[in-house]
Amino acid sequence: MALRNIVKVNTEAESVLYKKTRMVEKFDEKLKQLAEDMIETMHEANGVGLAAPQVGLLKRMFVMNVDPEEGDLVIINPEISEMEGERIAYEGCLSYPQMFGRIKRPFKLKLKYNDLNGAVKEMEAEGLKARCICHEADHLDGIMFTEKVIGDLVHESQLADNADNTDEELY
């Protein structure tokens, strides 16, 4: 395994964050190594999700870990089929360090995707897991969370002040 560099906004490499990704068609050892590298990178950065464009690759793929019992998930070629409910919460992004914004996302969703072997899988998600899936899926379409912020971005040092006035969760 190897740590990958996370592409940040306001850097030379940031343009990759705004491009649409390509479907993954080859499910091989190279893809499995990429998944391992992305998982290691996500954990090292204390994130709960990381999309391929964030490590400079235009592949429809992301990794996530929002539930310690479930562990690391690798999601390839995701398709969100149903969404239900709404919730507004603060979100941050490893590509936009220390900044957070309030984002409206569905509370529940259904997802169809490929696993690392190319098998088609389905899952239902709600709460933080659904939020993470939507956030990472947006990355695959070149959409940054900053494009969906309600109000202003806030620095992480201001979150405690802002969160005290709401019942919103933090992602």
Image (cartoon, rainbow, N blue to C red):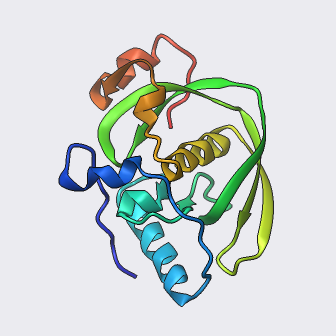
Farthest residue to the top: give it: 165
Above or below, 65 relative to 134: below
Above or below, 119 relative to 102: below
**In the drawing, does residue 75 fall left or right of residue 122?**
left
Number of numbered callouts drawn = 0
**In the drawing, does residue 153 fall left or right of residue 149?**
left
Front position in the image: 159 or 31: 31
Farthest residue to the bottom: give it: 29
Above or below, 81 relative to 70: above
Answer whether residue 71 is visible to the viewer in this image: no
Counting from the top left corner in percent of width and height, residue 166 is at: 52, 14
Measuring 67% from the left and 42% from the top, which residue is drawn there?
A: 130
Counting from the top left corner in percent of width and height, residue 51 is at: 48, 57
Measuring 76% from the left and 26% from the top, which residue is drawn there?
A: 85
- Picture quadrant of residue 29: bottom right
Measuring 50% from the left and 38% from the top, which residue is drawn there?
A: 171
**In the drawing, does residue 133 fall left or right of residue 51?**
right
Counting from the top left corner in percent of width and height, residue 2 is at: 35, 79
**In the drawing, does residue 94 fall left or right of residue 118?**
left
Measuring 79% from the left and 55% from the top, which residue is drawn there?
A: 123
Quadrant that contains the N terminus = bottom left
Answer whether residue 162 is visible to the viewer in this image: yes
Front position in the image: 140 or 153: 140
- Picture quadrant of residue 61: bottom right
